[in-house]
Amino acid sequence: MTILSRRFHLVDRPDGLPQADDFKLVESALDAPASGQLLVRNEWLSVDPYMRGRMNDRKTYIPAFELNQPLDGAAIGVVVESGDANFSPGDTVSHFAGWRDLALIAADSATRIDTDIAVQAYLGPLGFPGLAAYAGLLRIGNPKPGETVFVSAAAGAVGSLVAQIAKIKGCRVIGSAGSEEKLRWLREEAGVDVAINYKEVPDLTEALSAAAPDGVDIYFDNVGGAHLEAALAVANDFARFPLCGMIEQYNDTPTGPRNIYSVIEKSIRLEGLICTNYLDLWEEFQRDVGQWILDGKIKWQETVVNGLENTPTAFLDLFAGKNTGKMLVKLSHH
Amino acid sequence: MTILSRRFHLVDRPDGLPQADDFKLVESALDAPASGQLLVRNEWLSVDPYMRGRMNDRKTYIPAFELNQPLDGAAIGVVVESGDANFSPGDTVSHFAGWRDLALIAADSATRIDTDIAVQAYLGPLGFPGLAAYAGLLRIGNPKPGETVFVSAAAGAVGSLVAQIAKIKGCRVIGSAGSEEKLRWLREEAGVDVAINYKEVPDLTEALSAAAPDGVDIYFDNVGGAHLEAALAVANDFARFPLCGMIEQYNDTPTGPRNIYSVIEKSIRLEGLICTNYLDLWEEFQRDVGQWILDGKIKWQETVVNGLENTPTAFLDLFAGKNTGKMLVKLSHH
């Protein structure tokens, strides 16, 4: 039996905002799993802003995507055929061979997941976005009760976790987002103290200053640009800034924060955050966030796009802010 | 007897580069020292780049200078008359009532200093510039033997200490400065591995990249601007950046580092450094640096401007890079 996998290749390196024709769906025959391999039928694919960086021809903390090769990324699927004694057909696994329907993977790159919680949570609050939020806020931010935490893209996959963990830790939380619907969710479901619509306020620094009369102690950056400048302007002495993403800058000519000197004046610490640096926290993170989910203390939103063929669209929609919470692609198998 | 003190007032807040007529020498009568006070005849005054920030009408980590009031800053002088049992006439003290010839100060704001080392060292390697270098490099930078340290304004009061302490700690050291004379001193006296004349190289990032084939692990920033961008570009993963000063930006419209996203890509830590945050290190700093000076492991340079009336000129010359090492004003008393 020939096993046909459909996967997306990157066929052109985007200059600025990626376009649909930078991606091509390619059909390819897979071998049956050899010893130590698994054949997995993907059910959920993750698309994430960081993937934009991998589309440039430049190694960063993770290799660049190769042209005319399958893209990858986090995915959840079900084992169809196993060449490894630790896995059986029917097991649900998380792995990294996303952007495709059927995947042939090394068994040691797969993690069996608990299906008591909706499995796609392992691409969001219980996956790398959750780890970024948990490690960045707790280890870099080191929040103390009563401190003020500002988080940008607060309705996003990472930001919504940051906001809720900060509330659990007793902080006052200010979140920014770009639609009234996101703001309502932040106020009513995530429990943030002040939600700012950054698209509507005339001056973000003034809005943040009004929202944070005692200043900002922790700024969790997912956006960069004007958000980072506003946070530097309103920061308190000894503020901590976990820098997790700068989605505002990924596709444009980047600019730096003009008030960078505030870092000196206020003894601020800025620290870049790659979630895979914090794998030592994995078990603690799974235990804490898993419990907070079961206790109803952490909620999350998903934007689900259906069908493998729409994966590039889902990815592009991230940069238009069309997602609320985690952007996911759901595959249906016939 | 009337005691006349001559001191400089700030009479205008500079917009951009300060001008000589922003300062005015004013004569004022002092009372004899009351109980708990000292009358001090200053011998050495410090002028430092950070003072520029205090000339703006904005509180930072230290209050703004008030208009039409005496400026202050670090100074070394000799006690003329003491109202405190812990000090006697003839004691040499460091204190903070600079920018004047005679000072009436609180005894508890003065520190008696050892005159075995040239006393003006207490305004440089054994003063706040030295503490900034020591704390920033060791506590924020945390250098390990074999790592590469890049320091800007490396022939300056802070940078020259950073370069030499980094060599003592077994690092490879790259320093930048703006004249061949400074470069020669860095190579021949301070022992840096590579000295870069930032005014002469066509592209600072390329020059730094060539000088640091293994990348930069620690960048000690005294300059900001293009230096900070170059350091971000050449930094290794997990690099540490103590940010101590941004003299390039103090008088101009500030710009931010356009490659700020590198902080995330490379998990870099940037941390603002105010030396007075590190007073807990004072004794360890005095012991270590004092010993290194006595052992001949640390050298320093001074640029001495004579006469109280030339204090503003000495200050302005800092921004033209006319100093090599610590800029000092020496007072002569008749």
Image (cartoon, coloured by chain):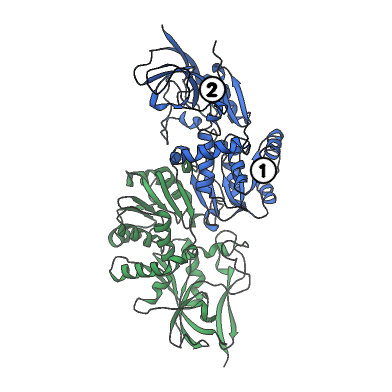
Chain colours: A blue, B green
* B120 relative position to A223: left or right: left
Q: In the figure, B70 relative to B132: above or below?
A: below
Do labels 2 and 1 touch, CB within 8 Å? Answer: no
Residue A27 against residue A195 in the figure, above or below: above
- Residue at point 48% right, 53% down? B271
Query: Which disc number belongs to residue B166?
Result: none
Q: Position of residue B3 (x, y in %)?
A: 56, 88
Which amino acid type is marked by label 1?
Val
Q: Specify few, some or many for label 2: CA neighbours under 10 Å numbering under 14, 14-19, or 20 or more.
A: many
The answer to whether residue B91 is above or below residue B164 is: below
Nearer to us in this view, A15 or A272: A272
Q: Secondary structure at mark 1?
A: loop
Q: Residues within 10 Å of mark 1 (few under 14, many from 20)?
A: many
Taking B123 as reference, is A114 left or right? right
The answer to whether any part of residue A230 appears in the image is no
> Residue A192 has which mark?
1
Q: Chain letter of disc 2?
A: A
The front one of A229 and A70 is: A70
Mark 2 / mark 1, whichever is N-terminal: 2
Q: Under tag 2, what secondary structure?
A: strand
Pointer 2 residue: A44
Query: Residue B164: image x %, image y %?
Result: 33, 60
Q: Is residue B211 above or below residue B299?
A: above
Residue A177 sits in quarter: top right
| Residue B212 visible in the current orientation | yes
Q: Nearer the viewer, residue B121 or A141?
A: A141
| Type of amino acid under label 2 | Trp
State the separation of the CA atoms marked 2 and 1.
29 Å
Image quadrant where residue A44 sits:
top right
